Amino acid sequence: MSGDIAVVGLGVMGSNIARNFARNGFKVPIYNIDYSFTEKLLSFEEGKNMIPCRTYNDIKNCLKKPRKILMLVTDTAVDVVYRPFMDILEKGDIIIDGGNSHWKDTERRQKEVESTGIHFVGMGVSGGAAGALNGPSLMFGGDKEAWEACKNILLPIAAKSPEENEPCVAYMGTKGAGHFVKMVHNAIEYSDMQLIAETYDILKKLFKLDAESIGEIFGKWNNTKLKSYLIHITEIVLKQKDDQTKKPLVDMILDRAGQKGTGKWAAQDSFDLGIPTPGFAEAVCARILSSLKNERVEASKILQKKPISVTLNGILTITIDDLEKALYSAKIACYAQGLAMIQAASSDYGYGINCGDCAKVWRGGCIIRASFLNDVSQNYTDCTKNLMLIDKFSKDLEEGIEGWRKVVAVCALEGIPAPLFSTSLSYFDSYSSEFLPANLLQGLRDYFGAHTYERIDKPGSFHTNWD
């Protein structure tokens, strides 16, 4: 019984995280339903620290107690993979789902195993294949007892924050907290990527720049407050040449984006929490619209945009500096929505999540890692109502708001779609408005449905006989 933690599911993520454990000196039982995956993994140098298993009993028999089993399988396969373990594991053993499961499914599974004394953990894993191998961001959710048993195995394999060199793994909270935080992480990722795509589109259509030149701009921005993994790889993608045509590869890629559903989950769940996340919904809608390629081609021939030029004496009325400020400001607004959603879930569902810890584990390894998360982690407290209200970020927004407004206005006039820039600005304007026209909404609701309304001069609910 020498195994420290077993890895079940040896696809790209499972294989790489098993190698990560092994290279950090842990003994790793490995299992895959197709044994050829196991054999392939054993051929790596790290294979000397792995124990091949052909059955679930093999896994059980070679693990130290409490047994720790990390599953890295698709969300649709989790039930099929984990349930057979219920017949052979013992009280105190730990099953970790490291896939992209919905947090509600994780909580259902936790209830299913509750009477057995076995711990079921939902752990968000971000960083892709490279992160799994070299250091992912890990978001652990479930019983605190399970975290205490697992943390000394997870700390060495996690990514390290670039500046503080701190492990990017933490206990997020009880129940489905780990997968909830990962879901929001993915929704922020959707928003971040959409903002970058819109920025590229503006530079291409309005500034008439080619992919190489746009890549240069993103490269420069990666030395500013915008420094992040996504900005970095945007430069790389834009500068990549197509082997076949020798043109920029990005110009040869069909403008139809895919998605796996986590952004949609977050947008839907935010409504249940009563938290506005227009950035998440708009990012999902943008991908759906992109999938309507044939319809868009047809519509472009019928619907006339009639753009209004924004040049003055042949000079554009916005600058690349305006665009940089707009991108950073909109980014703050989207992160504000995500953190507000996590905070609400923590309160409503009893998770006990610390949003500062979320920002800490996102500083390295994960897809949304960015330098500005240092400021988020240092300044976001349980008393914070919204990221935009933190002094550091409210000042950044004050500095960037003019450029942000100019970008949205120019895109509207020129007929360049910028849904994320626009909706995030509307979120900012709505959140910072002392008065919103919801009084008229309530009057209309009371008119046709007798839903009542509140008054500004006295407490209580009121109804008017409008006729």
Image (tube, rainbow, N blue to C red):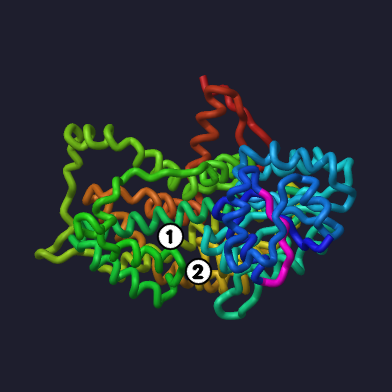
On the image, the x and y values in percent for residue 63 come to: 81, 57
User: In the visual, does 401 lie left or right of 63?
Assistant: left
The CA span between labels 1 and 2 is: 14 Å
Q: Which one is earlier in the sequence, the residue at label 1 or at label 2?
A: 1
Task: Decide whether residue 431 is among the magenta residues.
Answer: no
Q: Which residue is mark 1?
A: 330
Residue 301, quarter of the rendered image: top left
Residue 222, quarter of the rendered image: bottom left
Residue 385 lies, with reference to residue 455, above or below; the image says: below
Q: Determine whether the residue tagged by mark 2 lies in a helix, strand or loop.
A: loop
The reply to whether residue 122 is visible in this rendering is no
Comparing 78 with 356, the one in front is 78
Residue 335 lies, with reference to residue 399, above or below; the image says: above
On the image, the x and y values in percent for residue 241 come to: 26, 62
Comparing 89 with 342, the one in front is 89
Residue 123 lies, with reference to residue 316, above or below; the image says: above
Local crowd size for mark 1, using a 10 Å CA cut-off: few (<14), some (14–19), many (≥20)? many
On the image, the x and y values in percent for residue 464 come to: 58, 26
On the image, the x and y values in percent for residue 360 come to: 62, 69
Residue 208 lies, with reference to residue 160, above or below; the image says: above
Q: Given the image, on which type of amino acid does mark 2 rest?
A: Ala
Query: Residue at the location (81% across, 51% down)?
Result: 60
Query: Residue at the location (60% across, 24% down)?
Result: 450
Local crowd size for mark 2, using a 10 Å CA cut-off: few (<14), some (14–19), many (≥20)? many
Comparing 325 with 353, the one in front is 353
Q: Determine whether the residue tagged by mark 1 lies in a helix, strand or loop.
A: helix
Task: Decide whether residue 27 is among the magenta residues.
Answer: yes
- Mark number for residue 370? 2
Query: Residue at the location (80% across, 40% down)?
Result: 111
